[in-house]
Image: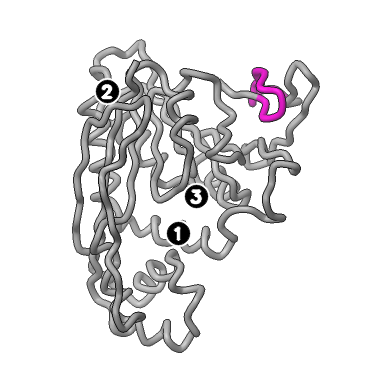
Amino acid sequence: MWLCPLCKSAISLHSKAIKCENNHSFDKAKSGYVNLLPVQFKKSKVPGDDKAMVKARREFHELNAYKPLKDRLVQRLAQHLIPSNDTASLVAVYDAGCGEGSYLDAVVNGLKQLGYNCSGAGSDISKIAVEIASKAFKTHQFVVASSFDLPLEDASQDVMIQVFAPGSNSEYVRALKSDGLLLTVDPSADHLYEIKSQIYDNPKKHESKDTQREGLRAVLSERLTFPITLTSKAHALALIKMTPFYWKLPQGRIDEIVELLSVVTADFHIQLWQKAE
């Protein structure tokens, strides 16, 4: 299902030497990921999230505080996929902007537990994020690539997910199979509002509204809200470190906020579309 990012011819990531028919070659890391972002396509020396932020997200997800969100994603996809008793059918799941891989792994494993035969793959522009994902979730294939130029064959994916990440609607439509599903997650009004309230005098709430997407039919739009009880200072710090707030505030201010936080609100806007022929 993979394409060379330079000439768009097919490539296999399982070959010892990863080359397309036009002899463009790509490196495969020891951890298993492949770099499909040519240096001339980079807009900065080290694009995407840095190591500290990605590691913070990995630490937070290991605590599984977003489990209700992950469970809901699996539930909504299962409601609209082919019946799970069709064991001959492989469900290809792709995470565009996968970060450290937690959402892809949760969706693939959740669907497998419901009887679906699934494969998982994902991409991110951050090499650090893809490396951490590859080491943490070895059963999935990860690549370094831009979500605005996905190295995927046309009509190759059953499910695409986009969680807190930018992307290209035309690329999603191109890569999805007929009747394929796109599932997105964005912050809703009250997401982490308790943290904002500690930082800003007049904190603003997120604005979330339904999105219209060309080539896709809206299937579902819903809000999922739940409290996160922070069981320790380490738990609170892991949450703050995965937000932009941590990197803008002095350490002393962070310590004050960690002491004050006990419960925060997780608030998400979930949308699901189906490819419209």
Marks 1/3 in contact by CB < 8 Å: the verdict is yes
CA gap between label 2 and label 3 equals 25 Å
For image coordinates 75% across by 42% down, the residue present is 40
> In terms of image quadrants, where is residue 177?
top left
Is residue 86 visible in this depiction of the protein?
Answer: yes
Q: CA distance from mark 1 to mark 2?
A: 29 Å
- The boundaries of the magenta stretch are 4-16
Residue 80 position in % (x across, y down): 23, 25
Query: Which residue is more in the foreground, 169 or 180?
Result: 169
Q: Pointer 2: what residue?
A: 81
Mark 1 sits on what residue? 57
Mark 2, Cα crowd under 10 Å, few <14 / some 14-19 / many 20+, is some
Q: Secondary structure at mark 1?
A: helix
* In this view, the mark in front (1 or 2): 2
User: Looking at the image, is 188 positioned above or below residue 106?
Assistant: below
Asked if residue 104 lies left or right of residue 185, the reply is right
Point out residue 204 in the picture as x, y percentages from the top left corner.
29, 70
Amino acid carrying mark 2 in the image: Leu
**Whole-number angstrom distance, CA of label 1 to CA of label 3:** 7 Å
User: Looking at the rendering, in which quadrant would you find the N terminus?
Assistant: top right
Residue picked out by circle 3: 100
